[in-house]
Image (cartoon, rainbow, N blue to C red):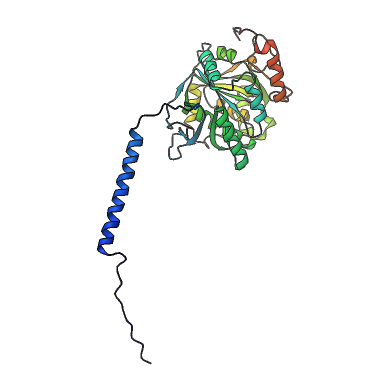
């Protein structure tokens, strides 16, 4: 059966020549107008309005994944241009906190840690110490929303790009030291928990002491049997050789590393050293691999306020203060804790 003939009709142009010309002219005029408004907005002097948080303190820290050096970059600096200039202080104190610790942070801001920018600035100028809360991220949107609200209100955080889990505290600690080094040019970097009562002026005095060893691991040192943790079996030949059966490391609630030590940590890839279940054991084991000086100071682990105490917590009952939200407030009411004069110590 012969196929039916096919007919082809010429397509009519969508717009006539005159219409297309008019359309192009209109587009050009719109573009010129938009460019003019944008140029005026850029060149126009500001009206003098300034945000209350003109110099934000909270930052988000992200890893430069393409870099093999392990250095950190600062991303999403809230309200600023994201610059990476390191702030110079004698020491940076990172107060490790979590998503379930909002009550602890409230208590801390009512005691030794100021809750406002001016107070933090005065404390930094008086002691040479900068303080920030340090926290990771989580997948719970409501918790992240609450954290963003707290950051907006107090602006005293370092936000790490790492999952906030108790089982991953060693990873968070390493991330903290890398971030701290990227943000602050300090002689010491201090890891502190959010459940201890701290005396900043005395901590400053302790850190300012002259030291002959450039690589210092400062803390309240404890000696625990190495073989209570089967993961530490690698230490057995060394302990037998040295005639020692104890693994020396600082208690976890607070310890400090000198800048030379932190530089070595920054250079590490995250999988270079072995991670143990406890972050204080993990850091202590790494210190064995470095030529560091273990400086033991009992002033960092006193069970009650004394004329020379630096950090107070309920040792050995709790790793920190028992019921910290309440105890922080109770200790701060004691004159010996909050108002006693700073005393020099040879310890």
Q: Residue at x 47, y 28 (%)?
A: 182
* Residue for point 30% across, 57% down: 23
Q: Position of residue 251 (x, y in %)?
A: 64, 23
Give the vertical position of 188 relative to 40 (above or below): above
Q: Does any portion of residue 250 appear in the rendered image?
A: no
Q: How many marks?
A: 0
Q: Nearer the viewer, residue 93 or 276?
A: 93
Residue 334 can be seen in this image: yes
64 sits left or right of 306 in the view: left
For the residue pair 294 and 257, the one nearer the viewer reads as 257
Residue 242, image quadrant: top right
**Residue at the far right in the pictured view:** 317
The location of residue 109, given as percent across then percent down, is 62, 23
76 in relation to 255, above or below = below
- Quadrant where the C terminus sits is top right
Horizontal side of 324 relative to 54 (left or right) equals right
Instruction: Pick the residue in front: 22 or 270.
Output: 22
- Residue 48: x and y in percent read 42, 26
The residue lying toward the viewer, choosing from 221 and 334, is 334
Viewport quadrant of the N terminus: bottom left
Q: Kindly identify the residue that appears in the image at 54 percent across and 14 percent down.
A: 127
Q: Is residue 195 above or below residue 309?
A: below
Q: Going by the picture, which residue comes out furthest to the bottom? A: 1
Q: Position of residue 269 (x, y in %)?
A: 49, 35
């Amino acid at each position: 059966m012969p196929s039916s003939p096919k007919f082809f009709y010429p397509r009519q142009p969508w717009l006539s020549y005159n219409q297309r010309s008019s359309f192009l002219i209109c587009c050009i005029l719109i573009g010129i107008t938009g460019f003019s408004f944008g140029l005026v907005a850029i060149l126009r002097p500001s009206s003098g309005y300034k945000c209350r948080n003109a110099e934000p303190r909270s930052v988000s820290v992200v890893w430069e994944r393409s870099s093999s050096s392990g250095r950190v970059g600062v991303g999403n600096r809230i309200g600023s241009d994201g610059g990476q200039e390191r702030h110079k202080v004698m020491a940076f104190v990172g107060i490790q906190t979590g998503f379930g610790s909002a009550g602890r942070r409230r208590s801390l801001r009512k005691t030794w840690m100021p809750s406002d920018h001016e107070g933090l600035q005065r404390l930094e100028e008086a002691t040479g110490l900068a303080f920030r809360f340090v926290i990771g991220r989580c997948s719970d949107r409501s918790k992240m929303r609450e954290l963003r609200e707290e950051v907006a209100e107090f602006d005293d955080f370092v936000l790490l790009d790492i999952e906030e889990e108790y089982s991953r505290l060693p990873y968070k600690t390493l991330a903290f030291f890398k971030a701290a080094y990227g943000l602050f040019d300090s002689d010491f970097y201090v890891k502190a928990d959010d459940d201890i009562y701290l005396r900043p002026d005395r901590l400053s005095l302790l850190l300012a002491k002259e030291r002959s060893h450039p690589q210092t691991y400062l803390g309240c040192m404890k000696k625990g049997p190495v073989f209570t943790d089967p993961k530490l079996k690698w230490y057995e030949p060394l302990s037998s050789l040295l005639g020692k059966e104890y693994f020396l490391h600082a208690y976890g609630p607070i310890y400090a590393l000198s800048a030379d030590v932190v530089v070595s940590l920054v250079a590490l890839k995250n999988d270079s050293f072995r991670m143990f279940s406890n972050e204080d054991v993990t850091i202590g084991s790494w210190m064995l691999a470095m030529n560091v000086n273990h400086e033991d100071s009992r002033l960092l682990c006193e069970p009650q306020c004394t004329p020379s105490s630096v950090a107070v917590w309920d040792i050995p009952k709790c790793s920190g203060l028992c019921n910290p939200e309440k105890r922080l407030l109770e200790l701060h009411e004691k004159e010996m804790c909050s108002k006693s004069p700073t005393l020099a110590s040879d310890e």
